[in-house]
Amino acid sequence: MLQTAMRFSHTLLKEVILTGDTVVDATMGNGHDTAFLAQLVGLNGLVYAFDVQEQALQNTDKRLVETGLREQVRLFHQGHETIATAIPEETSLRAAIFNLGYLPKSDKQIITKPDTTEQALDALLARLESKGRIVLVVYYGHTGGEAELAMVQDYCQKLPQEIYSVLTYQFINQKNNPPILFCIERK
Ligand SMILES: C[S@@+](CC[C@H](N)C(=O)[O-])C[C@H]1O[C@@H](n2cnc3c(N)ncnc32)[C@H](O)[C@@H]1O
């Protein structure tokens, strides 16, 4: 059976992340991806996770403590647009994940935005290792979602093919705007 965009995002990450790696969850939310990354990098690795909502940090912290994964994660109560200052320039990253949109069952006004997402992408690409991947799962059915999708599409299409390979993955016959996945891999 074909994988959902969310499941495929984990497949793409699992293929490249090794224990001891440093990775980023740019939109922590309830911490599902943060916990997944923490498991992959193990105790010798490091996950940087960002969110602007206090509730996201609380939910993620609880999830990580309950699953014994808290030690290898740094939680930042700040936007991913601060990655350039939060993560040292000399740090090389194996992977990063974004889930763009709003947190389900939470305040639908708090959404990711094109300009801050772009700033985060710039900072991540500057730190991405060879063979490293940035995966974006873009939910775009809400107000403002189309503009963010357009930015991501444009950003990805303009990346030079000598340095990056970029793919998109989407179901094209489903109702209700299923998310679209983008994966940027540094050659
Ligand atoms: C679709 S949800 C992420 C779901 C998450 N992956 C999970 O496992 O639950 C998007 C999240 O992005 C957060 N967000 C919005 N603007 C942000 C920003 N500038 N930086 C980081 N996170 C942001 C929202 O607060 C929300 O929790």
Image: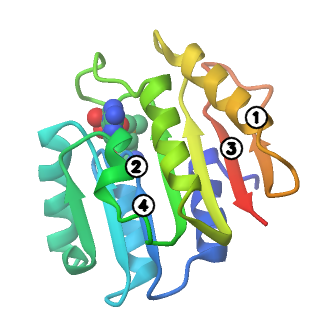
Q: Distance between the residues labelled 2 and 3?
A: 14 Å
Q: In which quarter of the image is residue 179?
A: top right
Residue 25 percent location from the top left of the image: 40, 56
Residue 25 versus residue 160 in the image, above or below: below
Relative depth, front residue between 117 and 109: 117
Q: Name the residue under label 2.
A: 26
Q: Mark 3 points at which residue?
A: 182
Residue 143 percent location from the top left of the image: 46, 9
Image quadrant in which the N terminus is located: bottom right
Proximity of marks 2 and 3: CB atoms separated by less than 8 Å = no
Question: What is the tally of numbered marks visible in this picture?
Answer: 4
Q: Mark 4 points at which residue?
A: 24
Q: Distance between the residues labelled 1 and 4?
A: 26 Å
Residue 165 versus residue 94 in the image, above or below: above
Proximity of marks 4 and 2: CB atoms separated by less than 8 Å = yes
Q: Earlier in the sequence, mark 3 or mark 4?
A: 4
Q: Which of marks 2 and 1 is nearer the N terminus?
A: 2
Q: Residue 171 carries which label?
A: 1
Residue 94 percent location from the top left of the image: 55, 71
Proximity of marks 1 and 4: CB atoms separated by less than 8 Å = no
Q: Distance between the residues labelled 3 and 1?
A: 13 Å
Query: Which residue lies most toward the right here?
Result: 162
Residue 135 percent location from the top left of the image: 60, 52
Q: Element type at marker 2? A: loop
Q: Inspect the image, locate mark 1, and give the three-letter code of the amino acid beneath it.
A: Phe
